Image: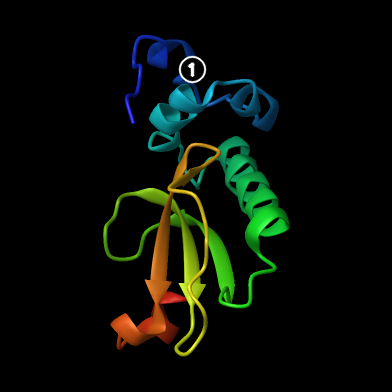
Amino acid sequence: MNVDMSNFKKYNSDNLSVQDYYNLNESDKIAICQELNMYNDRHLQIFKQVEKRFIELYGDQDGIELVKCGMAPMLGPLNCIKVFIPRGKKPVKVPEYFDGFPIFKIYESHYKSYNDIKM
């Protein structure tokens, strides 16, 4: 996906609100997503809202055990949506990106530390 960084500086602010974020186009969301800081209260609200919306749209799939929007545990720092898929469940269908966040599928069968990663 091509990301237009020309508008990036306009949005690179600690004061970016959930409303500001959702007013961005998808390309700008992808660019801004990696600049969000979970320890900034305003940004944390963006993480929570993205997670809530993702669960509403995709969380009812049998193969999804847990969804967390935050930093990837083994790729960091990378902001993403982590989708936990337990052993023996059907494959899940999710987009590559959702509201600017890349999707990272974590399969129990691929990670010995699966339960530790969920925390």
Residue at (44% x, 24% y) in the render: 27
Say what secondary structure mark 1 lies in.
Answer: helix
Nearer the observer, 105 or 39: 105
Residue on which the image places disc 1 = 11
Q: Is residue 119 visible?
A: no
Residue 56 point in image, percent of width and height? 73, 56
13 or 102: nearer the eye? 102
Q: Residues within 10 Å of mark 1 (few under 14, many from 20)?
A: some
x and y, in percent, of residue 117 in the image: 40, 76
Check the image and name the residue furthest to the right. 56
The answer to which quarter of the image holds residue 21 is top right
Q: How is the structure coloured here? A: rainbow
Residue type marked 1: Tyr
Q: Position of residue 38 (x, y in %)?
A: 50, 47
Which residue extends farthest left? 75
Q: How many discs appear?
A: 1
Residue 106 in the figure: left or right of residue 29: left
Question: Which quarter of the figure is the N terminus placed in?
Answer: top left
User: Which residue is rendered at x = 56% and y = 77% of the image?
Assistant: 63
Judge whether 16 appears above or below 98 on screen. Answer: above
Q: Residue at x 48, y 77 (%)?
A: 85
Left/right placement of residue 111 relative to residue 48 reads left
Q: Relative to 42, say whether 12 is above or below.
A: above
- Whether residue 49 is visible, yes or no, is yes
